[in-house]
Amino acid sequence: MKRVFIEEIKASEEEVLLKGWVHKINDLGKIIFVKLRDKSGIAQLVCTKEQIEDIRLETAIEVKGKVKENKKAPNGIEVEVNEIKVISKTYYEKLPFEINSFKDKTALETQLDHRTIALRRPKIRAIFKVQSEIETAFKDFLKNKKFEQIHTAKIIDSSTEGGSEMFTINYFDRRAFLAQSPQFYKQMMVGAGFERVFEVGHAYRAELHNTWRHLNEYVSLDVEMGFIKDEFELMNLEEEFINYLYKHLKNTCKKELEIYEIELTDEVKIPRITLKEAQEIILEKYDKQSPIGNIDAQGEVLISKYVKEKYNSDYVFLTKYPVAKRPLYTMPDEIDNTLTKSFDLIFDGLEITTGGQRINDYFMIKENIIKFGLKPEDFEFYTETFKYGMPPHGGFAIGLERLTMKILKLSNIREATLVPRDMKRLTP
């Protein structure tokens, strides 16, 4: 008999073969109800004492039984067990925390210490079903727009952007770095003839942050697009993606969204506000002074509050950041050359995207490298492409964990990270 996943059980079936873990045991005397859990859901089994002798929570079992209708059971179906076989025994003395309770008060750090056990809880695993579908939507959306997926090097010879601290590694007795972004490479691939590229890959930042919103290793959803008109074309593309994503999640993650009581809007319209305007709003409305040329974490929360009240939007694009606050490849604004054609996307009080138009002129990028106190010869691998007709281009990067966290309204980015790496955690 072929195994059936729990979500595939039909009332019309006479007998099924199920495999999974023992999630819960309810002993009612002569009859014992066992909740069986697999990756797709939970089924109620009707067993006898003899059948579940020596079986305890989290034992991996194989079950054959008859399908019966029962309105009180999950999905209105239960399985009357004919045969149970233990596939794998358990050897624990005590579970580190309850797996079968819907609400778990276990501290996040304890859950992360026992990550694979915590992930057996359906509510926690639902996070990563949503995250998987975010990535699927990202890929499908861009492929439909004639983008090609690429995979760039994560061990590099020099800093790609500067600013953030970088992890150094010993590379055959030479100093190398872990890439904090695929930025240079995705630009180079636009110039190499791909025109439109995207990447889903890890990024590494040795920043001394240990907060609810920071990781030292995260997944970046990167986009780079050639032959653009300006940075607003990129904002339009990302807005279109967010709308595509919401429709996709409604279709593929209905159960998971219900678990977290999330109702996604039918249409996302994202206001665009210059950074200067945002700073003025934050000061006037909330009496909050912003850092020069930026807004801080509290400022992101306050501008989101304002946008929600005025535009009923969870998102806002902040545009026209100063040259001094953007990387060396960012295109200056043609009207005010102290500003750049760049933007951040703030989602419910948290920056999830940085993007903008890039410099595409060879001499201009070389001059900028010098202005940033760097040596052009160290970047010849990057600037060579610009000698041979680099089209106007730009792109953006979305933090996958941050996007997941905000969609599900989680309180800590580690909840949306399968195996977190921060300042204190290198295991599991």
Image (cartoon, grey):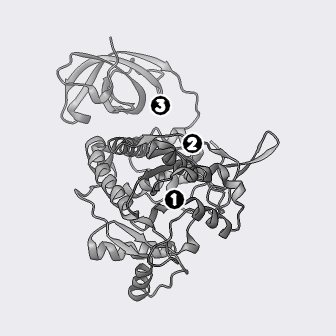
Is residue 6 placed above or below 188 in the rendered structure? above
Q: Give the Cα distance between marks 3 and 1.
A: 57 Å
The earlier-in-sequence mark between 3 and 1 is 3
Could you tell me residue 139's position as x and y percent?
Answer: 39, 42
Q: Residues within 10 Å of mark 3 (few under 14, many from 20)?
A: many
Amino acid, disc 3: Glu
Which residue position is annotated with label 2? 152
- Decide: is 46 above or below 327: above
| Image-based side of 40 in relation to 120, left or right | left
Q: In which quarter of the image is residue 238?
A: bottom left
Q: x%, y% of residue 15?
A: 25, 15
Question: How many numbered marks appear?
Answer: 3
Mark 3, residue position: 58
Question: Do labels 2 and 1 touch, CB within 8 Å?
Answer: no
Q: Nearer the viewer, residue 171 or 365?
A: 365
Q: Which of marks 1 and 2 precedes in the sequence?
A: 2
Helix or strand or loop: what does disc 1 sit on?
loop
The kind of residue on which mark 1 rests is: Asn
